[in-house]
Image: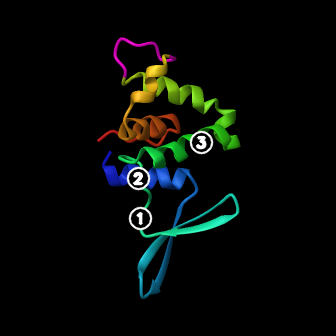
Amino acid sequence: MSPEAQRVAIAEACGWTIWSFTGTHGDEVWWSHANGVSKLRDNPPDYLSDLNAIHEVEKVLRTNPDYMRLHAWNVYCQHLGFYLTDRNVYDNNCIHTTAAQRAEAFLRTIGKWVES
C-alpha cells in the first residue's frame, strides 16, 4: 500500500473528508469536524512519520464506539506485536514501534490494509 494511500485511508477512518471546491487556494481541502471543532488542511496529517499524528489516530480506537465494540485496541496491540520479534505482544516495548509501523497496524486492525 503506497504511503499516500495509507495517509488517505487513515484520515478517512478518523473522520477527515475531502471537500472539493473552486477557489483561490486550490481545488480540494481536507475537512474534519471532531469534538465540535472544524479544521481544514491541504493534505491529511503525516501519520507515517509523525508520532504525534499517529497518537491521535490511536485515540480513535479507544473512543470511537464502533471500534470499541470490536475490541479494536486489543487487535491493534496484537498487530504491533508483529513488529517486535521475540517479545510478548503485551510487553511495554510495543511503544518503540515507528509511526509507519503503527499506521500499518491501525489499517490492518480496521480492515483497510491493502497488500501491494
What residue did someone put label 2 on?
7
Does the CB distance between marks 3 and 2 fall below 8 Å?
no
Task: Examine the structure image and report whether residue 105 is included in the region drawn in magenta.
Answer: no
What residue did someone put label 1 on?
43
Label 3: few (<14), some or many (≥20) within 10 Å?
few
- Which quarter of the rendered picture does the N terminus lie within? top left
Residue at image location 34% in from the left, 16% down from the top: 85
Does the CB distance between marks 2 and 1 fall below 8 Å?
yes
Of the two numbered discs 3 and 1 on the same chain, state the one appearing first in sequence: 1
**Vertical placement of residue 95 versus 17, above or below:** above
Name the quadrant containing residue 64: top right
Task: Name the one closer to the observer, 90 or 5.
Answer: 90
Drawn side of residue 30 relative to residue 37, left or right: left
Looking at the rendering, the stretch of residues picked out in magenta corresponds to 84-90
Label 1: few (<14), some or many (≥20) within 10 Å?
some
Mark closer to the observer (3, 2)? 3
Q: Secondary structure at mark 1?
A: loop
Task: Name the one closer to the observer, 34 or 21.
Answer: 34
Label 2: few (<14), some or many (≥20) within 10 Å?
some
Name the quadrant containing residue 44: bottom left
Drawn side of residue 2 relative to residue 88, left or right: left
Mark 3–mark 2 distance (CA, rounded to whole Å) = 16 Å
Does the CB distance between marks 3 and 1 fall below 8 Å?
no
Q: Give residue 82's position: percent from left, percent from top.
A: 39, 22
Kind of residue at badge 1: Asn
Q: Secondary structure at mark 3?
A: helix
Q: Give residue 54's position: percent from left, percent from top.
A: 47, 45
Kind of residue at badge 3: Lys
Mark 2–mark 1 distance (CA, rounded to whole Å) = 9 Å
Mark 3–mark 1 distance (CA, rounded to whole Å) = 20 Å
What residue did someone put label 3 on?
59
